[in-house]
Image: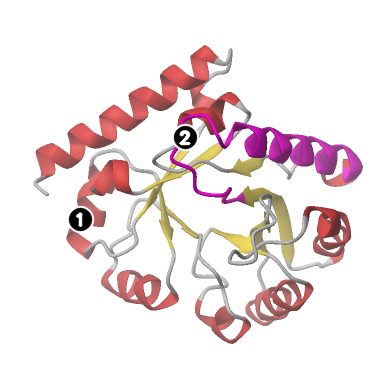
Amino acid sequence: MDTTELKKRIETVQAKIAAAARAAGRDPGEITLCAATKVQTDDTIRQAIAAGIAVCGENRVQELTAHLAAGAYAGAQVHFIGHLQTNKVKQVVGKVDMIESVDSIHLLRAIDAQAEKLGLCQDILLEVNIGMEESKGGVDPAQLRPLAELAQSLPHVRLRGLMAIPPISPLPGANRPFFAKMYQLFVDIRREMSDNQCDIDCLSMGMSGDFEDAIAEGATLVRVGTALFG
C-alpha cells in the first residue's frame, strides 16, 4: 500500500472514532487508536507512525522482536495484544509499554518476576473471555476479581484496566451486549480497587468491524488492523 492510501485510511478511521465518540456524548480525545500491525513490514509501520499512529499493537513475539530490532516502532508506544506464553515473557516485559493479554495467575506472576529482575514496573491489562468461548484466551468473568486483586498486590506490575475480544459476528451491533458487559466489569473493578483507581483507566475493546459499537459502550482503546492496512 502506498503512503497516500495508508494516510487516507488512518484519517478515515480517526474520523470514525471521533464521530462515534461524539455520538456517545464523549470526548474523542478519550479514545486511543492502537494500530494492529500483525504481518506488516518495518516500512509500513514507520509510514503509519509518520501518518499519525501513536500506538502499535503486536500479536506475535517473533514479529515484535524483529520490529524492535529494526527500530520500526520509533516514535510510538508498543502494546503486546496477542496470546503470551510464559516462556516468552522475557522477550516482552520491559520491551513494550503495555501487555494487554494477561489472563492467568501463572502468566501474571511470570511477568512480575521478570519485571523485578529488570527493576521496572510493567503496565498490563487483564484479558476477559467475555463470550465464554473455549477457543479464546482470557479469564472467566467470574474469576476476574481475584486475578485483579493479585495484580494489584504484585509490586512490579501495574494494573491499567481490561481487554476483551468478543465472539465474531457478521451481524451489525451483535457485540454491543458483550461490550456493555465489559464496561460494567471495568466500572466494578475500578470501584472495588478504589486505592488503585487512578491507574485503572484503559478499556481495550473493539476491532475493525465493531470499534464504533465498542466506543458507544465505553471503550477507551480500540485495536484496528484491517481497516488501516487491508
Gap in angstroms between the C-alphas marked 2 and 1 = 31 Å
Q: Check residue 153 for magenta coloring.
A: no
Q: Which residues are magenta?
A: 164-193
On the image, numbered disc 1 is attached to which residue?
44
| Amino acid on which disc 1 is placed | Thr
In this rendering, position of residue 43 left or right of residue 148:
left
Question: What x and y, as percent, mark residue 171?
Answer: 47, 34
Residue 17 position in % (x across, y down)? 43, 27
Residue 88: % across, % down:
54, 82
Residue with the mark numbered 2: 171
Q: Position of residue 54 (x, y in %)?
A: 39, 44
Front residue (pair 6, 166): 166
Which secondary structure lies at badge 1? helix
Look at the image and say whether residue 190 sits in the magenta stretch: yes
Q: Quadrant of residue 25?
A: top right
The residue located at (73%, 37%) in the rendering is 181
